[in-house]
Image (cartoon, rainbow, N blue to C red):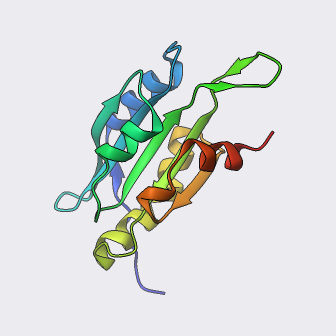
Amino acid sequence: MSNVNICDITDEVKTALKEFRFSKAQSTSALILKVDRENQKVVVDEKLEDTTIDEVRESLPGHQPRFIIMSYKREHGDGRISYPLCFVFYTPRDSHSELQIMYAGTKITLQRSADLNRAYEIRELDEFTDDWLLEKLGN
């Protein structure tokens, strides 16, 4: 197996992850991270608060991978509301192979660093919907 370049997770990203995890948001929010290819570091791309999956999807580039950490406002049938934290690895089929490898090599490290158990992968932006996420989250 060839060496996979695993990108560093910067202190800025670690701080953003911690703040995101402990925020008391009462709505869906997302932290979008990207790989800075030149410096081989994971950096914050965008923070979206009081957002929807549609808005998150619209902010993602069509041909570049991204890591999306979401706090998803979920309304249960019995009236309860929960905010599951999800890690979504978006890697479009037509993105540059070197970039795909860098993201794939960094995914597990980032997931562990963020302490996220719910990890999902998506290849097509139009599949990234509320229904898709609810199906992944299960009952």
Q: Residue at x 49, y 87 (%)?
A: 1
Locate residue 68, reporting x and y percent.
44, 45
Locate residue 106, reporting x and y percent.
43, 59
Task: State which quadrant residue 40 falls in.
Answer: bottom left
| 109 over 10 or under it: above or below | below
Task: State which quadrant residue 10 falls in.
Answer: top left
Indicate left or right for 80 with 126 as reference.
Answer: right
In depth, the one of 59 and 71 nearer the eye is 59
In depth, the one of 128 and 114 nearer the eye is 128
Locate residue 48, reporting x and y percent.
35, 29
In depth, the one of 39 and 137 nearer the eye is 137
Indicate left or right for 139 with 93 as reference.
Answer: right
Q: Residue at x 70, y 48 (%)?
A: 135
**How many dots with numbers?**
0
Q: Residue furthest left?
A: 38
Tell me, yes or no, if residue 5 can be seen here.
Answer: no
Locate residue 72, reporting x and y percent.
56, 31
Task: State which quadrant residue 76 falls in.
Answer: top right
In depth, the one of 112 and 98 nearer the eye is 98
Q: Residue at x 34, y 52 (%)?
A: 8
Q: Residue at x 48, y 40 (%)?
A: 69
Position of the C terminus, as image quadrant, is: top right
Tell me, yes or no, if residue 138 can be seen here.
Answer: yes
| 93 over 115 or under it: above or below | below
| 17 over 138 or under it: above or below | above
